[in-house]
């Protein structure tokens, strides 16, 4: 048992995880979309699959759950 166990952060209430993708540059940014307003709060840049895994682990998002892509 590690004394330095990392806590998972909470997904903001009323939000769903999304990945914002740029059509022009291919840049991907992970964040959360508010269900009522549609506003996206960007959390981290996704450069590779490892970054996506870190995002899922950090916020406790299961690996079998599909994350919506927004263009």
Image (spheres, rainbow, N blue to C red):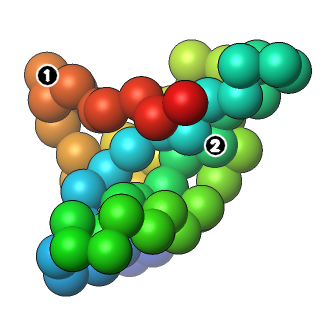
Indicate the position of residue 32 as horizontal and vertical percent values.
Answer: 40, 60
Depicted 50 relative to depicted 33: above or below: above
Badge 1 element: loop
- Marking on residue 34: none
In this image, 10 relative to 3: left or right?
Answer: left
- Marking on residue 29: 2
Closest to the observer: 30 or 4?
30
Q: Residues within 10 Å of mark 2 (few under 14, many from 20)?
A: many
Closest to the observer: 40 or 44?
40
Depicted 35 relative to depicted 23: above or below: below
Alpha carbon separation for disc pair 1 and 2: 20 Å
Q: Mark 1 points at which residue?
A: 64
Examine the image and state in which quarter residue 5 appears. Answer: bottom left
Q: Which residue is drawn at 32% across and 51% down?
A: 17
Q: Which callout, 1 or 2, points at the residue further toward the start of the chain? A: 2
* Of the two numbered discs 1 and 2 in the rendering, the one whose residue sits closer to the viewer: 2
Q: Which residue is drawn at 46% across and 35% down?
A: 70
In this image, 50 relative to 34: left or right?
Answer: right
Depicted 71 relative to depicted 9: above or below: above
Indicate the position of residue 14 as horizontal and vertical percent values.
Answer: 17, 76
Examine the image and state in which quarter residue 38 appears. Answer: bottom left
């Amino acid at each position: 048992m590690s004394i330095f166990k990392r806590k998972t952060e909470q997904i903001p209430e009323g939000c769903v995880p999304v990945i914002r993708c740029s059509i022009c540059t291919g840049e991907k940014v992970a964040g959360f979309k508010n269900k009522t307003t549609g506003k996206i709060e960007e959390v981290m840049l996704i450069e590779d699959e490892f970054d996506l895994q870190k995002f899922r682990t950090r916020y406790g998002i299961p690996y079998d759950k599909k994350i919506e892509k927004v263009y």
